[in-house]
Structures are given as C-alpha cells and as structure tokens.
Image (cartoon, grey):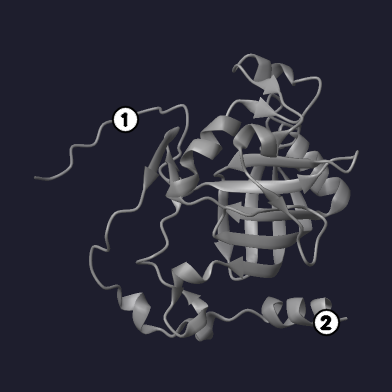
Amino acid sequence: MSPMHIKSEPSILYFGTPVVLIGTLNKDATYNLAPMSSIFWLGWRAMLGLSSRSQTTKNMIRTGECVLNLASVDEVAAVDRLALTTGSNPVPESKIEKGYRYEPDKFGIAQLTPIESESVVAPRVKECRVQLEAVVETTNPIADQDVKLRGNLVCIEVRIKRVHIDESILMYQDQNKVDPDKWRPLIMSFQEFYGLGSRLQTSALARIPEYKYRSPDIGRARMETNN
C-alpha cells in the first residue's frame, strides 16, 4: 500500500535520535548532568544543538569541555528522572512554563555515579557504556536571522579526545569496533523513549572496513594525551 501524504505542521521534528547525558563542570566545581538528543556525529566530531540559556551550554562555553555519556535502554529511568530539572538558578522563564525545577545535584536525583575523566575535568557517568570526552571547537548561533529566535539556540561543535567503551558491546577480539547487535542506545522520538529492534538486513555500507573512515582527530587526540 502506497503512502498517503498530507500537509502537516508538527511542533517538533524529533524523528528519532540517541539520548546523551552531557557532563559539565559548574562554576563552583560541582558537576552538572543534562539529557539531550539534538546531536549527530561525523568522525570524531559531534554537533550539539542546545539552548543558549541552559547551564550545560554556559558550562561548555566557559570551560571548553564536556563528556558525552551515551545512554542505553538500561538508563531510561535515570534519564527520565532528569527530564524536568535544570542546573540554572534562577530557572529561565521558558523552562518554568514547561514545568522545570532547579536541581543542583543532578547525579543524585538521577541515581547515577560520577567518575573522573582522563583528558577533561567534566564528569563521566559510570553506568553509561559509552563515554566520550570532548573539547569545544566552535559555537554557532541558530536562527540568528529571526528576531524572535535570535540568541536562544546555539550549535556547538565538539572534538572527541578520549573514548571509553564497555567491553561487553565490543566486537569479539576487536577493541576498536562496536558490535551493533550488542549496543542498544536509548532513542528519543517525539518526546517518547524507544530502543532499537533487531537488525533488518545486512547493509551494503557494512562491506567498507571501518578503518577507511578513520579521522586524523584520532591521532591528534592520542598526541595530546601523551604530551
């Protein structure tokens, strides 16, 4: 049966993206943790869409660092406990309207465990199977040409410096390759939580060895860590 398309105006266009818990450092040296799903990766770079008024954004711009802790389906309850909390005090008006409250202890309310990173001061989440230590490369405004939206949104490019992956989701005898049959990321789709199902079929792209995508950022990260 062929699709029947009609014109539609959804308020949001979240068709399904992975949930990330962004760890950052507050001004008082305490940890902040915020869930988000406006993110995509290219090589060892990631682009994050954030509110310019959020505590996470302010922390990232001030420190130039963060940790992208990727949530799996096992962390869904923890992510939901963080959903309507903010590290900003006072709470921005736009968030008050949506029911957010100020919460200084994000790890505590989420019942997650902070652990130190190796190349940045921002925290990792012990329970997350994937932890990406990163530095901020550029910050660009979003919708800057619109007078009503100007100054509200930013796109932050980060460069990954260190990757920590739980061995349970790696390919057998290959510590540099994630097994997609074992990794079950938490997905946000139109404000609801989902997980991945089983593989539908073998992809033609999977015939290309992953090393052919290897970015120069990997060597750069290794050199920075060793210095």
Q: Residues within 10 Å of mark 2 (few under 14, many from 20)?
A: few
- Considering only order in the chain, which callout, 1 or 2, is on the residue closer to the N terminus? 1
Identify the amino acid type marked 2.
Asn
| Secondary-structure class at tag 1 | loop
The residue sitting at 8% across, 45% down in the picture is 1
Q: Residues within 10 Å of mark 1 (few under 14, many from 20)?
A: few
The residue sitting at 52% across, 85% down in the picture is 211
- Residue 97 in picture, x, y percent from top left: 63, 14
* The image quarter in which residue 129 lies: bottom right
Decide which of 108, 151 is in the foreground and name it.
108
Label 1, on which residue? Answer: 7
- The vertical placement of 36 against 39, above or below, is above
Q: Is residue 98 left or right of residue 102?
A: left
The residue sitting at 40% across, 27% down in the picture is 9
Residue 10 visible, this orientation = yes
- The vertical placement of 221 against 129, above or below, is below
| Secondary-structure class at tag 2 | helix
* The image quarter in which residue 222 lies: bottom right
Question: What is the CA distance from the residue labelled 2 to the residue labelled 1?
Answer: 55 Å
* The image quarter in which residue 42 lies: bottom right
Residue 142 visible, this orientation = no
In this rendering, the count of numbered labels is 2
Q: Residue 226: which disc?
A: 2
